[in-house]
Amino acid sequence: MAQQKEIAVMGAGLVGSLLSVYLAKEGHKVTVYERRPDMRQANIGGGRSINLALSDRGWKALAKVGADKPVRDMGIPMYGRMIHHEDGSTSYQPYGKEDQAIYSVSRGGLNQVLMDYAEQHGVELVFENGCDEVDLDSGVAHLSGGQQVHPDLLFGADGAFSRVRLSMMKTDRFDYQQMYLPHGYKELSIPAATGGGWQIEKNALHIWPRHDFMLIALPNLDGSFTCTLFAPFEGTGGFDQVTDRASLMRYFEAYFADAIPLMPDLEEDYFSNPTSSLVTVRCYPWVKHDSIALIGDASHAIVPFYGQGMNSGFEDCDVLHQCMVQHGDDWPAVLDAYQESRKPSADAIADLALQNFVEMRDRVDDPSFLYRKKLEKVLHEKYPEDFIPQYTQVTFSHIPYEKALAAGKEQEAFFTRILPKLDMEKEPDSAVADQVAEAWRTYRN
Amino acid sequence: MAQQKEIAVMGAGLVGSLLSVYLAKEGHKVTVYERRPDMRQANIGGGRSINLALSDRGWKALAKVGADKPVRDMGIPMYGRMIHHEDGSTSYQPYGKEDQAIYSVSRGGLNQVLMDYAEQHGVELVFENGCDEVDLDSGVAHLSGGQQVHPDLLFGADGAFSRVRLSMMKTDRFDYQQMYLPHGYKELSIPAATGGGWQIEKNALHIWPRHDFMLIALPNLDGSFTCTLFAPFEGTGGFDQVTDRASLMRYFEAYFADAIPLMPDLEEDYFSNPTSSLVTVRCYPWVKHDSIALIGDASHAIVPFYGQGMNSGFEDCDVLHQCMVQHGDDWPAVLDAYQESRKPSADAIADLALQNFVEMRDRVDDPSFLYRKKLEKVLHEKYPEDFIPQYTQVTFSHIPYEKALAAGKEQEAFFTRILPKLDMEKEPDSAVADQVAEAWRTYRN
């Protein structure tokens, strides 16, 4: 057992809750401070509610502390994308092999399960008492309730607008970037079918791609779907085009006509839900004075388009734990190894998430892109070691994100060269896979 | 005359002082709020004192309001770089044509002249009363003295760590980046020669380039030089190598032996002056609520290696004035045109300044680089319209920085291709210029 430390985790969100379990399991005395009330008591929402897609990295990090079991029943597997074309037709693209899926989970529900799980492991959760500021030199944290705490170690798991990070920002030589997309998002909904069940395919992530904007829908356990409209704040397809019921209906009739019958609450949802912005945050260092560290969104907030925000935050916990195993009680070494190993991964997933927005809204209904996806699938099935599609590397593997990013660039360059040489009218078969695999080996050497 | 506005300028630094003159000359009622005491009374330093190099953009912006005349006598022309090689030898590279120079000026002295000049034009300067925060919605500024002011227009000219910008940062969709170099800087000095005059060449910017670090020296009117050591915080040639007198002398003997006799106060300077960091700040938008705008370092703090920090800030005033001429009393249009026109220029000079650090510390003593510089000079003299070196575009022209940046990339690619084909042992002459000019025309078409 490690030498026991008093550890404060700022933020009882998804990453803060899971992190507290990791630390408690190593024998540390862990207190989590959360600004909001206990969502399990107050029955309030868990903040932003873009539905979450739990994938392999998240599952692995949960499983390492046994937290996957209580979560299993909450997720709905989505085996592929269901594309809703402008003419009302649909087409389906599997995400990976037959049994590979990403899992739609409710942010609030998952958070509550992790809070319960943390308490079962001896973690103390303190609510309505968030971290306002950390005096980095003394290590004293000032809480919104007025108290001060002085833990041995402090983790800022307090999200994209982290106060712990804000305290670090006031120090010299702290690199920081916040970058907004010209797009925002708004939550909408598709209720369950009359009499129960799902109005559209349950086991898929639905996308209405419209080039510069898109609508998506993720299934919930109760038969409903949580939808999100991603659109520019201004311009063609922009939120500024919609000012009243009439313009809302014109907008949906023009772009998402087939969704209208599914969305009886469209008008109320649209005008009562906020239009929120989409930010990418990068910073460095993540660690100050060998004892204060950032984790999750606080260190690397990303846009949601690769479904990796939560997964990367959970993987942070896994990587931190590996560093704890390696360096034992030498916390300066643990934290330094953690930030050095994790920063390149965080930068890579931030880039990947931005790239995948273009893929989702603009490329998924392009014929040559669809052909490439099919070809990648055949190729990967026949040569699982030689060729792993970038999507599979990010979503269904634990390959570091920076390697997946580099592999994706190589694959993009390769397919740009090879696709014009293939007969894209014909479904890619085993013979084509052999031919392309040979070209891929040559290309890489 | 324009419709009179009450305008608050936050910061009486170089840009704030010059801006206030521009605004007062258009008939506005201008008050400048400055956190520090009046440096003309208190005889204190003007903050950071990397010596400044005033070049064409700065002169033009000063001249437009007649402020060049009081500044003329303060500057020492530097017609080129004097390179101090490791073996103690020196070589000289002219910056441009024979009469082209950048001017070494004292930051404090220039600032005082501009403050006087502003007061002569009816500007009110308020000292020891800086802007702490701006309530962007109401337009009310909270001053460090406790008062509040509510001007019609407010300019944040409050530097790299601007409080006006900090208020903007708290709003949604504000893009922001602060990025530190791994290098810091420390001010040192070379006193005047015994009996007066300059110990080393007066009319040059002196550089001791040592690849990853360098020492520079700029002349002062009194015969002294202000020196700056730029070095990594850690590692080879790093500040961490120097901890006491003995290690300081070892450091200077190893890298700057020929400078030691020039610097009798080296030890005292080194250990009493701070080691400061070098930051690049980018942000957007620069304007909020059609009435609150950032200018100078507050909107684009850059590293000092192209000598364009002040010059770009002065050019901001010039560009703003062009927008005032174009849009008259329509301030929302003025400010929007200003930020849209100026943001690409600011991003470009930030990149150029970072690039020029590599040039100064690592390339200026490389033989092929020296040959290229000579070739560019011959080429520009013979074909002044067809070929303008990037350095000349940035320093001796008013070509927008983004065009100079693009031109520099094109020139770099061209010379990488053409240099191996030339006889670099031979001084480039008129015949070589003809040959290269022909290749340049072909390359560009």
Image (cartoon, coloured by chain):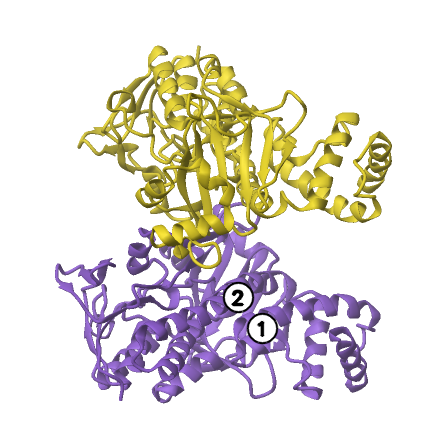
Chain colours: A yellow, B purple
From the top left corner, tell me how far across and down residue B113 is, in percent.
30, 81
For the point 50% across and 29% down, the residue is A53
Residue at mark 1: B404
Asked whether B306 or A380 is in front, the reply is A380
Circle 2: is it few (<14), some (14-19), or many (20+) Cα within 10 Å? some
Among the 4 quarters of the image, the one containing residue B207: bottom right
Q: Is residue B167 above or below residue A57?
A: below
Q: Point out which mark residue A8 bears.
A: none
Check the residue under mark 1 and report the chain it is in.
B
From the top left corner, tell me how far across and down residue B295 is, in percent.
36, 68
Q: Amino acid at mark 1?
A: Ala
Q: Is residue A92 above or below residue A168?
A: above
The N terminus of chain B appears in which quarter of the rendering? Answer: bottom left
Q: Secondary structure at mark 2?
A: helix
Discs 1, 2: same chain: yes
> Given contact means CB atoms under 8 Å apart, are the residues at marks 1 and 2 in contact?
yes
Asked whether B305 or B337 is in front, the reply is B337
From the top left corner, tell me how far across and down residue A137 is, in percent.
31, 37
For the point 63% across and 33% down, the residue is A92
Is A199 situated left or right of B258 in this image? left
Residue B224 visible here? no
